[in-house]
Amino acid sequence: MSEKAVDVEVEFDRQVERLVELGYPELAGRPAERFGESVAPLRELVRSRTIGEHDPENGRVGFALVVTRRLVPIEQAMQRTALVGRSTPGFVDRSFEEGSLARFVAPEAVHVPDADAYLLFDVDRGEEFCGAVPVDAMDAIAGRERTVLTIEEGIALLTLYPEVLVKNKCYMLGGSRCGDRRVPALWISRNAPKLGWCWERNPHTWLGMASAASRVAAA
């Protein structure tokens, strides 16, 4: 889907329908109709904004609907992901010790809406930072007045656009930290998406740093 072809309202509805098909309403403990009603106000926000480049196959997305862990736990959200053309579900790497995911939250510099769901605009999987030291990549993104993605945002991007996660173009999620040197990341393992982590000063040639221009929640 190219930038010229995207109809933002049609695309918003597609994203909602995708989440419903994957069972998000059930995971959130809501009927499908109520789930749709809860995210409907975000549709107006999409209509009112100018959407940037939309080319998922090349790692750029105009907007993405983010459902937070307040509605759907991270582990269950990962199980609803898959690679293009594959059916093996995504998973959380066992290097996350029991209970540690709850400690990976947005640091003070990353401003996340206090909402169950919100919109992420002008998303880039950030392959330009493949091979860069993660802390340097995060500094560069901040210098552009953009924001690094959280775990939930990275999963949302993958869920709605599986084509963004491909060999040698995977991405780190510097918007979720737990106070140590670990930086969460999404990459491919055993023919499936894996949520793991890397050290903040260890570069990887196949891991970029995902970012976005802004986050917006309904009033």
Image (tube, grey):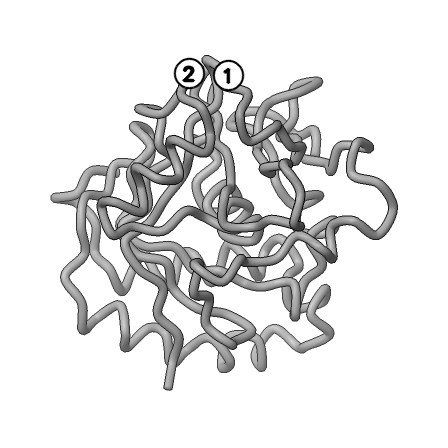
Q: Residue at x 65, y 36 (%)?
A: 195
Q: Is residue 61 above or below residue 105?
A: above
Q: Point out the image quarter for the C terminus.
A: bottom left
Which amino acid does the dot numbered 2 rest on?
Gly
- Residue 60 x, y percent position in the rendering: 29, 38
Q: Quadrant of residue 111?
A: bottom left
- Number of residues whose C-alpha sits closer than 10 Å to that of mark 1, classed few (under 14), some (14–19) or many (20 or more): some
Q: Point out the image quarter for the N terminus.
A: top left
- Residue 105 x, y percent position in the rendering: 61, 57
Task: Determine the secondary structure under disc 2.
Answer: loop
Q: Residue at x 68, y 77 (%)?
A: 30
Which residue in the structure is indicated by mark 2? 131
Q: Is residue 44 above or below residue 49?
A: below
Q: Indicate which disc residue 70 carries.
A: none
As drawn, the residue found furthest toward the right would be 98
Which of pointers 1 and 2 lies earlier in the amino acid sequence?
Answer: 2
| In the foreground, 104 or 77 | 104
Left or right: 111 with respect to 22?
left
Left or right: 34 with respect to 167?
right
Q: Residue at x 36, y 51 (%)?
A: 147
Mark 1 and mark 2 residues within 8 Å of each other at the beta carbon: yes
Q: Is residue 172 above or below residue 64?
A: above
As drawn, the residue found furthest toward the bottom would be 219
| In the foreground, 196 or 145 | 145
Q: What is the distance, in whole Å, between disc 1 and disc 2 at their CAs?
A: 5 Å
| In the foreground, 26 or 97 | 97
Which amino acid does the dot numbered 1 rest on?
His
Which residue in the structure is indicated by mark 1? 204
Task: Determine the secondary structure under disc 1.
Answer: loop
Q: Residue at x 64, y 36 (%)?
A: 182
- Residue 184 x, y percent position in the rendering: 60, 38
